Amino acid sequence: MTSTMQTTPSETAEPRTHLLRKRRRILMVMVGVIVSFLVYPAIFPSPQARALRRVRELGGYAGGSDRSIDPFSLVGLPKPAFVPRIPMKKGDVVGFVVEGKAVTDRDVEMFCAAFPLAEQVDLSSTSVSPEGLLPLAMLPRLFRLLVRHTKADDRLLDVLASPNLQFLELDGTQVTDAGVGRFLSSRSGISRL
């Protein structure tokens, strides 16, 4: 003889309701995570995104390593036969040009912090102070630096430490012959000054 126990609808509904509540909580957490990934970058952009937006606001240009942009063409320079490269991710900024724009000292500091792989920088004809140019020392891969017609002085030459620096344009600056002499005596790779 088999005995069958009959359950009432309220007894079977209770575990089902508990299961539905649990699924609903999991779904809400998943929706929250997805929304946070979509909304967070829009509200709190990365330092690089803020710097790129500032370059565009100034009317300048920043080029990346997506290989569709030749970083040497940023400032009208033919690409050399061989340039040692450190592997970069797609989207890394390797050069920025804000020539003749209303760049502030704080902008230069932001650009140098946000674009640490920058190889080419053009700050010509800007009103950045001599102290405002000192963050350029944070760019270890700097290959070409244009600071024509700026307030650059010997302090900039004293802090530039990039071993890759090949081109440095200083026309119309406050750099002295003594500063250039000290700089060249500590360098052998400068091809154009």
Image (cartoon, rainbow, N blue to C red):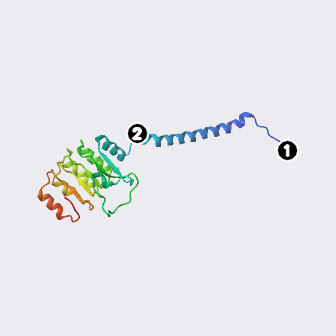
Q: Earlier in the sequence, mark 1 or mark 2?
A: 1
In which quadrant will I find the N terminus?
top right
The image quadrant of residue 70 is bottom left
User: Under tag 2, what secondary structure?
Assistant: helix
Identify residue for label 1: 2
Looking at the image, residue 17 sits to the left or right of residue 95; the answer is right
**Residue 14 at what x, y percent from top left?**
68, 36
Task: Give 156 or 77, whichever is nearer the viewer.
Answer: 77
The image quadrant of residue 60 is top left
User: Under tag 1, what secondary structure?
Assistant: loop
**Residue 140 at what x, y percent from top left?**
29, 58
Identify residue for label 2: 43
Q: Amino acid at mark 2?
A: Ile
**Residue 153 at what x, y percent from top left?**
16, 52
Residue 85, placed above or below residue 114: below
Residue 160 makes an appearance in the image: no
